[in-house]
Amino acid sequence: MLVLVVNAGSSTLKCQLIETDGKKSLMKSLAEKIGQSDATMSLQFLPDGQKKRYAIGGVSIDRCLEKVLELMVSEPGSPISSLEDLDAIGNRIVSGGEYFDRSVIIDDETFPLIRKCEALAPLHNPPADTCIKMMRRMLPETPQVAVFDTAFHQSMPAKAFMYPLPMKYYEKYHIRRYGAHGTSHRYAAQRAADMMHRNIKHMGVITCHLGSGGSICAVEGGKSIDTTMGFTPLDGLMMGTRSGSLDPAIVTYVMRHERLTYDEMDRILNKQSGILGISGTSADMRDVTEAAHAGDERAQLAIDMYVHAVQKAIGSYYALMTHTDAVVLTAGIGENSAELRERIFAGLAHMGMILDKERNDFTGAIGEDRIVSIDDSPIKIFVVTADEEMRIARDTAALVMGEDVH
Ligand code: ADP
């Protein structure tokens, strides 16, 4: 099935054309700084087309998506000749609120509920909804699916998702833990079960999505029972530019003393903190690792704090589950940094998570799902490739073919 995956952000639009039977990506496009005068877009047909760039200054997100569609049929080398060739569209939606515990076909019943979730992700959901509307108008016969970052975590019990605030804030504003990276955690846990030839329904798995954003999830019996991201993706682990969890009193303290507005404080917590805030040089773990090797003490502190936060979360989920069979690492840092994996598990061997140095260091296996623990480690450690676009495409194809995706 030929699926166009649409991932709309606050100022970015990522699209991928995926052939789900062969699990192949046929086209990738990325638009950045949407709405600004210097906005640009790149588009490339895969595997070996040339990456072309286009200026899209001042263009709105739906117009930008229209341009991707136009280029997809008009550019030489495109695998499709008409938009009718598209079998389905898969949309990534950041928040599904409390309405959605799985991916759904977008229709007159579900779309109004999707729109109701806009207040929970005001930067991300509205542009995604704008794209859905445009596609419904332009290709009314092509089925569209919504895949939510939050859906997998809807299985969390109230004791995990409630914040200890006055109840009225949950009732009035739906303030609770929603989590994120749901498609990634669901897939990572399932891959661990596959690689252990076990039924996920009888397993406890801790999944660690460690990219520029990061979250950890306790998956028991195939269901999320707790996760580190919260009401928003700011909660939990220290990340590239996000602070993660901190004493909430710090927020009002800094705002009062620096006379900051809400938006300024929001920016500090989301864009200027985390690895960037501590290292002072970069939000990118590769740069920070390099700087630490060269003796930069702030870079070293940023790495030490990051490792500490990951260890603390893994340990707390170990304590929460009735048993733990596997830990899975995925996304940029989890997949590629043998050094960080070594640091993380050096502190966790006493819990039965024992890394195999040789397997962990073997660079020839990068890009392949694999085990990196020793053979008799009581808890197995896996590295799994996160490919969220492929997951979205597969959910989309399954729903369109009438299969269940839960
Ligand atoms: P996102 O999709 O959220 O942008 P990714 O999953 O691509 O994030 O992860 C990006 C992060 O992974 C960056 O911090 C990057 O430095 C880090 N990363 C990628 N490769 C390596 C590596 N070899 N060593 C350390 N960090 C790496």
Image: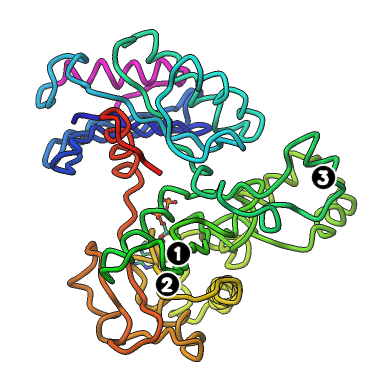
Quadrant in the picture for the C terminus: top left
Whether residue 74 appears in this view of the structure is yes
Q: Secondary structure at mark 3?
A: loop
Check residue 207 in the rendering and tell me which mark sits there, or answer none.
1
Q: Percent x, y for residue 117?
A: 61, 29
Instruction: Give how far across and how far down residue 175 sits, in percent.
Output: 73, 42
Q: Secondary structure at mark 2?
A: strand
State whether label 1 is within 8 Å of ligand 1: no
Region rendered in magenta: 54-75
* Quarter of the render that holds ligand 1: bottom left
Q: Position of residue 164 (x, y in %)?
A: 81, 55
Q: Quadrant of residue 358?
A: bottom left
Residue 124 horizontal side relative to residue 159, left or right: left
Whether residue 39 sits left or right of residue 177 in the image: it is: left
Q: Quadrant of the N terminus?
A: top left
Q: Is residue 65 above or below residue 287?
A: above
Viewer-side residue, 275 vs 113: 113
Residue 19 part of the magenta-drawn span: no
Callout 2 crowding tier (Cα within 10 Å): few <14, some 14–19, many ≥20 = many
Disc 3 marks a residue whose amino acid type is: Leu
Circles 2, 1 touching at the beta carbon (< 8 Å): yes
Q: Earlier in the sequence, mark 3 or mark 2?
A: 3
- Disc 3 target residue: 260
| Disc 3 from disc 1: Cα separation | 37 Å
- The structure residue drawn at horizontal position 56% and vertical position 59%, both measured from the top left corner, is 225
Which numbered circle lies on residue 296? none
